[in-house]
DNA sequence: TTCTAGTTACGAACGACGTTCGTGTCAAGC
DNA sequence: GCTTGACACGAACGTCGTTCGTAACTAGAA
């Protein structure tokens, strides 16, 4: 089957193409996705190139285009694959805040397992069915919790956006930390803030500790709390 | 002066290099930044290449590297330039919510004037002094409003992150709309949501209107309200 | 003025990227 | 057994960011 048809079918399930006879092939689109995820997990999203994936599959880059339209298409398949692994709880009206936080934490951890992949998530129109499944699940939790439909719809969008941006920032900071000399572990960043001229940056220097504080995902939890608590 | 020194000086004002004699040059780093912004405003951030900027300056790409370390450095200069144009109000304890919203709206409009440039803002460590100036200004507003230092510090980060992500999503949707055939003006997107199988996506189909609603920056205002109101 | 030193400008090239073309290969239907 | 269509893939194209080597130029010393 043509990969363009496959993409169209993925986006629009009604137009499901007639199921051709299964043909024995050397490798499949799923193998490409798995290999790509391995590459990202090991070397980061920046290292994800068609050639790199092809090499990991012992072939040339041209072979991939029989199963994948584009690199953008591959990106879409990747985050679709990530979304497929998420478990969406049955909505419980008494625990909707924790449920939403839990789903967001799942997405966060999934993104961070594959550093930099959230860049692909941000640069993509959310048309893939697996993404819609996630947003449907979050919407269900919020509606069950009594959130008004309009607020719930916008909140899902805002939460997904923030989670992706948070993970991207984290991945960028880490990968930069790896090789660049001018970078920022929290302690070094704090030292820099404190060393700024105090007359032009009084609050930044005084509160350098707060600006760089936060073990683990404290910053993440704080922002999610801000958003979720505002929905009550 | 070596561009590496210039970058170092920009990041670390104490280490200000001895002011060399001003040398008459054919073009300066500021001209490169302005030209790059023109390119982005006209053709989007994706079209911003070293060659494109060089061509607009009637020269070859190699010439740029006398003033700019690399493309990442140019990105940094670009958003530094954007931040320099922001006006930060004198903190008013009685109007801090509106002041914060106003600053965020300024950032948003500045990002949207140069479509896709928020990608550069997200992929960057916030070390540039102009960015610190903005975050200092927002911090000042929040602290004047009585927000606790830790909450204020984290809120500044969350707000900047959300604004950048929001603008990136908007830019992506628009640029995709330009050429790709499979895309989403709000009406088309709503039709797609409504056309999904209702048994697996009951809430998405039922609330397709809410999911795609929002003229102007309603979604933006909603999320900012969520965050800002939670800080009281 | 002339010379020298150091900086700037830039054509040409390198390696890597995404993508396409054309050809070879192989399994399934008549 | 032969045809057919999908698949695999080497080779190539055009573009990207970046570097190298060299020519052009300016500022100060002689």
Image (cartoon, coloured by chain):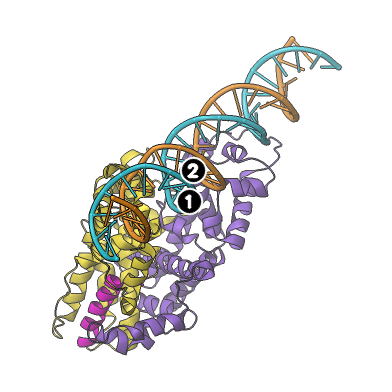
Chain colours: A yellow, B purple, C cyan, D orange
Q: Is residue B181 left or right of residue D3?
A: right
Sequence-wise first label, 2 or 1 = 2
Q: Tell whether position B67 is magenta.
A: no
The chain ID associated with circle 1 is B
- Looking at this view, is A23 or A114 the one in front? A23
| Image mark count | 2
The residue drawn where x is 15% and y is 86% is: A93
Q: Which mark is residue B13?
A: 2
For the residues beneath circles 2 and 1, the answer to whether they share a chain is: yes
The residue drawn where x is 48% and y is 51% is: B129
Label 2 vs label 1, nearer the camera: 1
- Specify the quadrant of the image occupied by residue A24: bottom left
The residue drawn where x is 46% and y is 66% is: B172
Range of magenta residues: A126-144
Q: Is residue B97 left or right of residue A88?
A: right
- Looking at this view, is A184 or A75 the one in front? A75
Q: Quadrant of the N terminus of chain A?
A: bottom left
Q: Which mark is residue B129?
A: 1
- Looking at this view, is A7 or C28 the one in front? C28
State if disc 1 and disc 2 touch (CB < 8 Å).
yes
> How far from the left and from the top, in percent, is residue A107?
24, 65
Q: Is residue A218 left or right of residue B130?
A: left
């Amino acid at each position: 089957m043509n990969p363009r048809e496959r993409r169209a079918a993925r986006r629009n399930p009604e137009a499901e193409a007639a199921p051709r006879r299964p043909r024995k092939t050397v490798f499949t689109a799923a193998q490409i996705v798995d290999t790509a995820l391995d590459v990202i997990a090991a070397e980061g999203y920046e290292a994800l190139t068609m050639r790199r994936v092809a090499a990991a599959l012992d072939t040339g880059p041209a072979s991939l285009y029989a199963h994948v339209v584009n690199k953008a298409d591959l990106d879409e398949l990747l985050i679709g694959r990530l979304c497929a692994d998420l478990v969406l709880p049955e909505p419980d009206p008494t625990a909707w805040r924790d449920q939403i936080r839990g789903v967001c934490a799942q997405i966060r951890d999934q993104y961070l397992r594959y550093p930099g992949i959230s860049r692909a998530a941000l640069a993509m129109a959310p048309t893939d069915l697996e993404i819609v499944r996630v947003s449907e699940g979050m919407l269900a939790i919020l509606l069950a919790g009594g959130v008004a439909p309009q607020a719930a719809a916008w909140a899902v969008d805002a939460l997904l956006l923030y989670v992706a941006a948070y993970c991207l920032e984290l991945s960028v900071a880490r990968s930069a930390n790896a090789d660049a000399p001018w970078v920022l572990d929290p302690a070094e960043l704090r030292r820099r803030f404190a060393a700024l001229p105090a007359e032009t940056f009084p609050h930044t220097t005084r509160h350098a500790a707060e600006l760089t504080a936060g073990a683990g995902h404290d910053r993440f939890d704080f922002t999610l709390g801000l958003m979720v608590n505002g929905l009550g």
